[in-house]
Image: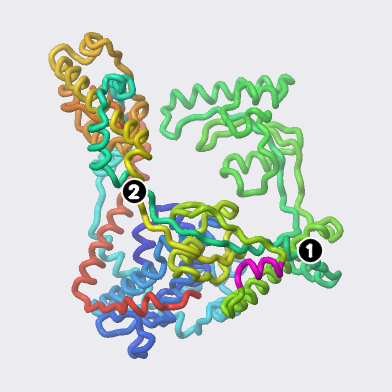
Amino acid sequence: MLHFLRRHSQSRVIQVIFSLIIAVFVLWGVGAVVNEGSPLTTIASVDGKPIEQLSVQRAEMNLAQAYREAYKGQFTPEMRKAMNLRQRALDGLIDRAVLVNQAQKLGYVIDDQELRDSIVDSPAFQVGGRFNKEHYLRVLRSAGLTPGDFESAKREDLAVDRLQSVIGDNVTVSDDDARDDILLREEKRSLTFVKIPAAELSAQVQVTDADLEKFYEDNKARYAEPEKVKVELLSYPVDKFGENVAITEEQITADYEENLSTKYTQQHEVHARHILLRVPRDADDAAKTTARSKAEDIKKKIDAGGDFAALAKEFSEDPGSRDNGGDVGFFPRGRMVAEFDEAAFSLKPGEVSDVVETPFGFHVIKVEEVREERQKPLEEVRAEIVATLKKASASEKAKEAAGQDEQAIAGGATLDQIAEKRGLTVEKPEPLARNAAFPSLGRSLPLTNALWDAKPDGITAPVDVNGTLVIGKLVERIASTTPPFAEVKDRVDAAYRLQKATELAKTEAEKVLAAAKTDGLEKAATASSRKTEVAAPFARSGPFIPGMGSNQELKEATFALTQDKKLGEKVYVVGPDAYVVELREVTLPSDEDLKKKIAETRKNLLEKRRNDAFARYVAELKKKAHIEVNADRLEAIPTI
């Protein structure tokens, strides 16, 4: 996993994850590979040295925690499953084991002083910027590590780092390499095109029932109804279990004191408005100068007594705040980009900043109000505490009830009987396809999987669906069916007409292309009673082309065109429509822009090439290593 993180170290999310991993000590090697292991708990082996189940569990758990911290609420159980974190964790342990073995073979020895310096310099073990031994031992204890375990693994990590440095030292990047990389990423092209819309030609399509029936038979899979399940759902809404919850004064006081320094401390915040004049990140100096000048003119109007909110509505290019007079509300330090943050927190209420440049463009900022950091008194947050404690207590009651009912159902009780006893409702939706949302609950991959894995009349364990526990019952499986032609004739007719209209559009476009080869695209368009249109400049990455849609083949062909050979060689179909294209303009970064970006690009490109070289090196080592993985045992590991 260290190898995975190094390879993706330029990703902002991975940088966050990497820092979090360091902070929580995801030390993939601690206990990962040992000289002897139990056959019952060995998940994999590298050159005969086992990787134990506990190591995989620890690696998976800490990797999940790192992603959870990085993605916040966006890291869902479905996302965790899709990312296959257990396999990633094992892959990281295997990579590390292979690298440690190679470092040992090459004689990379980390002496005590180098180890000591590495530990002392680690911010994770510092208090007030200085190494603190008590803090060091406390952190290791909280991670379940002994100093011996940690320091042994740290020596191995340092040896692997030295190995990576040796591999990376053989990689170089020249200014020409950097320049080529910039041109590859920042070159933009625009197209002139003639579009032949299929919709305009659909009326020309001649349709017979025989044609439609043949089309239906050839494309039956399009009209198949997916397999569905008929289910019953018993939900345990938290508010239903909170009706008779009583909160004591002792509970309120304890929660307040426990969370006083965090949850109940008002952060230093400012309430601000701004006027933004947007500037693209790749804008040239002329565009930036124009935008700054306009922002300075607006600032002069404000200084002369102009109404800030009215000027924001008139001039601001921030759609999120413009209609509200530029109001962005209250925010703490760190919420906005650094330049905006610094300016806003330097102002007093009523003051207006000079023009501030950020990656988004140029801003003029006004601070309306400042809230200083303060601890909120108990009476101010009492209602909030009571509501929080009631919800927590109700959640526990709902969980307890669902657990009891699961046992009752196993003993023969029905969902309807349980619902009547609890005063709940059993939801009985129409049969659902696998990718469908539950009508009153929304989408839930865990509940969907549990129901689809069940046998008829089978009951799921309680599943948390967006904060509500649910017990589901699979009533019936409904096999996939294909409706008869008569039931879907209208759909077949529409699809058939569109397909034939696209073929007609392509035939007409080919005539335009043939004429364009002789007379040029403009004349060919006029001769066919069509007009030329322009696709705004676009970069090489991705399949999307402005005004046309997504077509990777067309995107690649566009960047192969030259001024000597501007006309596209063939007709391209994007969606249902046909296009004839011609290169209009090639836009390259200026020499001045290139010079500004050379150094940073060389640095990033060097890092990427070093990581790629190291990845290839690890791949070669793994080919030569004897690696065994017990897939069944890996799958059976309990999640912690």
Q: Earlier in the sequence, mark 1 or mark 2?
A: 1
Please name the amino acid that badge 1 sits on.
Glu
Q: Nearer the viewer, mark 1 or mark 2?
A: 2
Cα separation, mark 1 vs mark 2, equals 49 Å
Give the quadrant of the N terminus. bottom left
**Residue in the picture at 69% in, 37% down:** 272
Colouring convention used in this rendered image of the protein: rainbow
Mark 1 crowdedness (10 Å alpha carbons): few <14, some 14-19, many ≥20: few
Tell me the tag on residue 243.
1
Measuring from the top left, give residue 218's x and y in whole percent.
Answer: 23, 42
Instruction: Name the main secondary structure of what is drawn in magenta.
Output: helix
Q: Are marks 1 and 2 in contact (CB under 8 Å)?
A: no
Q: Position of residue 214 (x, y in %)?
A: 23, 37
Question: In the shown orientation, is residue 637 left or right of residue 584?
Answer: right
Image location (x, y in percent) of residue 137:
56, 80
Asked if one can make out residue 37 in the rendered structure from this viewpoint, the answer is: no
**Residue 346 or residue 381, whichever sits in front:** 381
Disc 2 is placed on an element classified as: loop
The residue at the point 58 percent across, 24 percent down is 295
Along the viewing direction, whichever of 234 and 553 lies nearer the viewer = 234
Q: Which residue is mark 2?
A: 482
Magenta span of residues = 414-422
Q: Residue at x 32, y 35 (%)?
A: 492
User: Can residue 415 be found in the magenta stretch?
Assistant: yes
Q: Where 110 sits versus 493, above or below?
A: below
**Quarter of the image where one finds residue 171:** bottom left
Q: Amino acid at mark 2?
A: Thr
